[in-house]
Image (cartoon, rainbow, N blue to C red):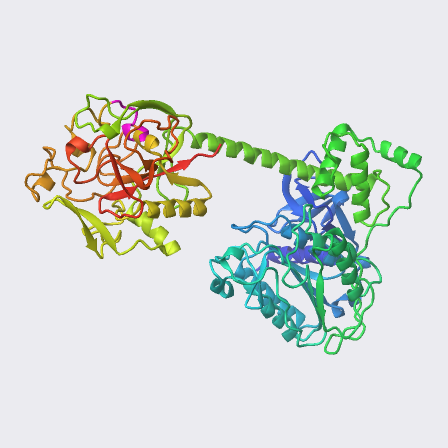
Amino acid sequence: MRRSTTGTCIVLFGLLAWLAIAWGDTLMVTASRANVRQGPGLTHGVMATLPRGATFPILSTQNGWHQIQLDDGRRAWIADSVVQLVRALERRPEAASQRRSALVIGNAAYVDARLRNPVNDATDVAATLRQLGFEVELLRDASRRQMQDAVRAFGSRLAQGGAGLFYYAGHGLQVAGQNYLVPIGANIKAEFDVEHEAVSAGWILGAMEYAGNGLNVVILDACRNNPYSRRFRGAPGLAALASPSAKGALIAYATSPGSVAADGAGRNGLYTKHLLRYLQAPGLSVEEMFKKVRIAVAQESGGEQTPWELSSLTGDFSFTVASTVGPGGSGDAERLQDAPRPDTPPPSPQANLEAAEAGLGLSRADRRLIQLGLLAEGFDVGKADGLIGKRARAALRQWQASRGEAATGYLDVAAAKALLASGEAQEAQEQEEARQAAAEAERRRREREPGTVFRDCAGCPEMVVVPAGSYMMGSPSGEAGRYDNQGPQHRVAIGEAFAVGVHEVTRGEFARFVRATGHSTGDSCWFWDIGKAEWAKRSGATWRNPGFEQTDRHPVVCVSWEDAQAYVRWLSRETGKGYRLLSESEWEYVARGGTRTARYWGESESGQCRHANGADLTVQRRHEGWTVASCDDGYYQTAPVGLFSPNGFGLYDVLGNAYEWVQDCWNASYKGAPGDGRAWKQGNCSLRVARGGSWYVIPRDLRAAFRFRNTTGNRLDNLGFRIARTLTP
């Protein structure tokens, strides 16, 4: 039988490919962002964008482009101008015995308090540490589980010996003298949540000390403003960690204990900006390096931010030269390598610099991309118009100085390539931002279209957009059942579309608010005793149990005007939107639904039971003599919302079911009332208006113009509320 060799060949081929990668050259991205393409050249499509510091083995090279394999297995090409090569022969065989490990975390995408720079800071620190020979694990926008798993794996690596470095940028806070780093997704409502939602800085330091590797550096750029400060009793910033129990540890803070660090206006935070500057400075001990960082930060901040360190180092240590590791380390003379760096060209006379730049043949479009590249790196060029003037030259000099190059202010081949790549990525980002802005504008336009129905969150009330318009408010003198307080009629103009609750706020929606806030609604509720024809207070009645059976789909009742105000304030905070009660004129406008009749279904009460839950035969069967409509809707008290027919604006139960609080103070007539839809804030403001009638209101009063009033603190078993939302521009 012939033995097949196909599988063996495949295995051998894969092994050879792996060996080629393992022992071949590698590259590291040096631009802030770099596009990788489907082929070697700018004409090929972009496959992905890589961050600074990303490293890959080189599979092949062609015409100034390198082929790499992405993490998802696809092969792509990247330009030589945006990377730094590490030749296989330049790797030091003794590196394995001189182990250096780093865990770098940057958290920025917080829901409550997003930060600008921590992901940039962590990415740039990771890239720099890799250049200094560290084996780096980089986490961006990490959850609590991801951070904890990474710290445990980091401790295992440190147990193999060598130097360890932990860097964190993001929100940090102190509770009871203990420091915590805040992961993405933390649900922190009060101080007692912190221990279970954040990651203890002391636990991280303990994991490093337990490894027994001999030398550890902890850098915390985590003293930014505490986003939960209003909920906490503690001090701002971070507390001083207890002195390391093991020798050979240094803890560095972006600012002094109890103070707050700046997030930074450029690409990096103020502290990390100067840390990156001095990490690669040759010949500095770790103490000297942090001292220079401290001086630079204090000078730039005008003394408002002063970095601070706590150290138990017993030996000498430098990031760029030979250092001594204290007892318990992997050796007394562990060397920290420098990654290869391009040589800095000597300064040239200005004429030669100008001629060299002119020889690059850059078009105006190229120069604009270069300006965008400088902007992306955090250097101010003014307007990116493709004209390299004094401002752009100054920015170019600053960029060159930040890279340790001669600050000539003129472009050479390497600078042009690097900035063109950054500019291309920046342009792509701006185009994406423009696309997103256009999409947001379209979303807002659609949001303002009358008839649009939406919810701002899963548990939020359903809203519908009603159009701008005008109408005659109040009842005409000849309308049956008219009262004097419903006039004089006057025209009201609603100038802008706004959103209104499709239904009255339900008991389930109100319960969500109470659970979230602990809001108290008292322990009694007023009710109308039909038999005695008088108001009476029912002790023990609340919105949860108003004295009759309800479900979460019924309108909430037994709530005061003040309770309704608390609800809309909470909902506004939860959603970031402008929720409120309707003004009285807005309420009547939406209740009429574009009609001019006494009721939105017609002039007479006929048909009431199809459209509204009011006094009907169901009520009369319990209360003989009560004036009712000659129909039966099947409900004696409140009905679940949405059972009856809506009006022309798509609103349910605007008449009947439950009265609805509105914003306005009580006035006995409309003389002097606003005509533009605003709430009337003058009058008797201890009384507020309620509109719409309820389940036992007689047919004569179940009209769009009917008005009712009550004190702001009273709670009635037939009184709830409906909400409005101001639409964004």
Please give left or right for residue 653 compared with residue 568 in the image: left
Q: Which of 709 and 451 is in front in this view?
A: 709
Query: Which sits in the foreground, 254 or 379?
Result: 254
Q: In which quarter of the image is residue 432?
A: top right
Q: How many marks?
A: 0
Above-or-below relation of 642 to 340: above
Residue 367 appears in view: yes
- Residue 642, by quadrant, is top left
Q: Residue at x 37, y 47 (%)?
A: 567
**Image quarter (top left, top right, bottom left or bottom right) of the N terminus:** bottom right
Residue at the spot 6% in from the left edge and 39% down from the top edge: 625
Residue 307 placed where, x, y %? 71, 60
On the image, the x and y values in percent for residue 267 come to 69, 47
Left or right of residue 543: residue 394:
right
Magenta stretch in the rendered image: 589-596
User: Residue, x 72% and y 62% (percent of image)?
Assistant: 134
Position of residue 484 measured from the top left corner of the image (x, y, whole percent): 23, 28
Q: Position of residue 235 (x, y in %)?
A: 58, 62
591 in magenta: yes
Q: Nearer the viewer, residue 516 or 92?
A: 516
Q: Is residue 600 left or right of residue 631?
A: right
Determine if residue 705 is in view. Answer: no
Q: Residue at x 20, y 44 (%)?
A: 638
Name the residue at the bottom extreme: 327
Where residue 33 sits, quadrant-wise, is: top right
Q: Is residue 404 magenta?
A: no
